[in-house]
Image (spheres, rainbow, N blue to C red):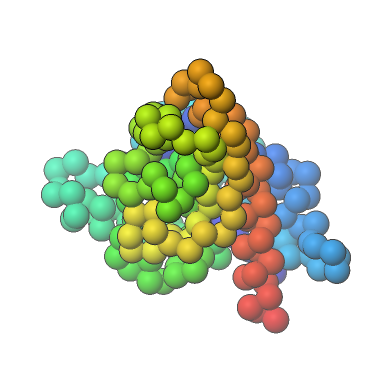
């Protein structure tokens, strides 16, 4: 059976587009050296912000696109838990075998982490364990990398656990930091690596999940 994937987004969705394109070109059913064909499909996309372009990308590809906003009337911990449970219900509804955080800015917690242990992956725009944790997202990451004088940066795909950016690393892609780089120029080059990394990680996860079934 094909692995249903639930993709969580918060913005433009360029990494979602990389996944959509990969599915269209058969990357998720191409298998590996032994010609094993695991199979995977994006079953639905969920955004925690209304009107973001990622939702349009999903709809254009014929993928169900849903919006689940955090309830700002709740305290932070309760708000995260309540949103996480709504996403868990959607994952169950679409029989998702894999949950992919592709630029998703809300923090998951609670039951979804237990039910989907080892089946939630996150993309982070730095080389973890450096420059991760609460508040480290978007341009803040790149600004901090540059301020520290790092010679290289990149992106990381990791399994999600109860910490923030603390789960086991699946893969990383590295780039050199150039003299005169800004947060914007660094982000642009890392984005290109993200598009490759997220597809590679999903292929790896599909293969691992199908192996467990056999």
Instruction: Check the picture and name the quadrant holding the C terminus.
Output: bottom right
Q: Position of residue 177 (x, y in %)?
A: 54, 30
Question: Quick check: 209 above or below 5?
Answer: below
Q: In which quarter of the image is residue 115?
A: bottom left
Residue 48 at least partly seen: no
Q: How many marks?
A: 0
Residue in the image at 21% along x and 51% along y: 79
Image height of 71 relative to 50, above or below: below
Q: Residue at the spot x=66%, y=42% of the render? A: 196
Q: Residue 178: give x, y in percent of width and height.
A: 56, 25
Q: Nearer the viewer, residue 124 or 60?
A: 124
State left or right for residue 2 relative to residue 122.
right
Please tell me which residue is depicted at 69% across the width and 66% down the height of the picture: 207
Tell me if 160 is positioned left or right of 18 in this view. Answer: left
What percent of the width, then of the height, locates residue 8?
A: 46, 47
Q: Nearer the viewer, residue 165 or 61?
A: 165
Would residue 40 be found to the left or right of residue 87 on screen?
A: right
Task: Let me know if residue 49 appears in the view.
Answer: yes
């Amino acid at each position: 059976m094909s692995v249903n994937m639930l993709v969580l987004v918060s913005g433009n969705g360029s990494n979602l587009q990389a996944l959509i394109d990969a599915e269209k070109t058969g990357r998720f059913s191409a298998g590996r050296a032994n010609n094993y064909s695991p199979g995977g499909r994006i079953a639905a996309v969920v955004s925690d912000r209304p009107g973001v372009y990622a939702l349009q990308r999903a709809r254009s590809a014929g993928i169900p696109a849903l919006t689940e906003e955090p309830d700002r009337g709740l305290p932070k911990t309760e708000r995260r838990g309540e949103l996480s449970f709504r996403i868990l219900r959607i994952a169950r509804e679409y029989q998702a075998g894999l949950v992919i955080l592709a630029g998703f800015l809300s923090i998951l917690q609670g039951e979804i982490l237990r039910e989907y242990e080892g089946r939630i992956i996150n993309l982070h725009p730095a080389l973890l364990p450096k420059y991760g944790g609460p508040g480290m997202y978007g341009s803040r990451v790149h600004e901090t990398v540059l301020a520290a004088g790092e010679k290289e940066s990149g992106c990381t795909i990791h399994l999600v656990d109860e910490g923030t950016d603390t789960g086991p690393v699946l893969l990383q892609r590295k780039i050199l930091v150039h003299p005169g780089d800004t947060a914007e120029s660094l982000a642009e080059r890392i984005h290109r690596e993200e598009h490759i990394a997220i597809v590679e990680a999903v292929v790896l996860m599909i293969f691992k999940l199908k192996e467990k079934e056999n």
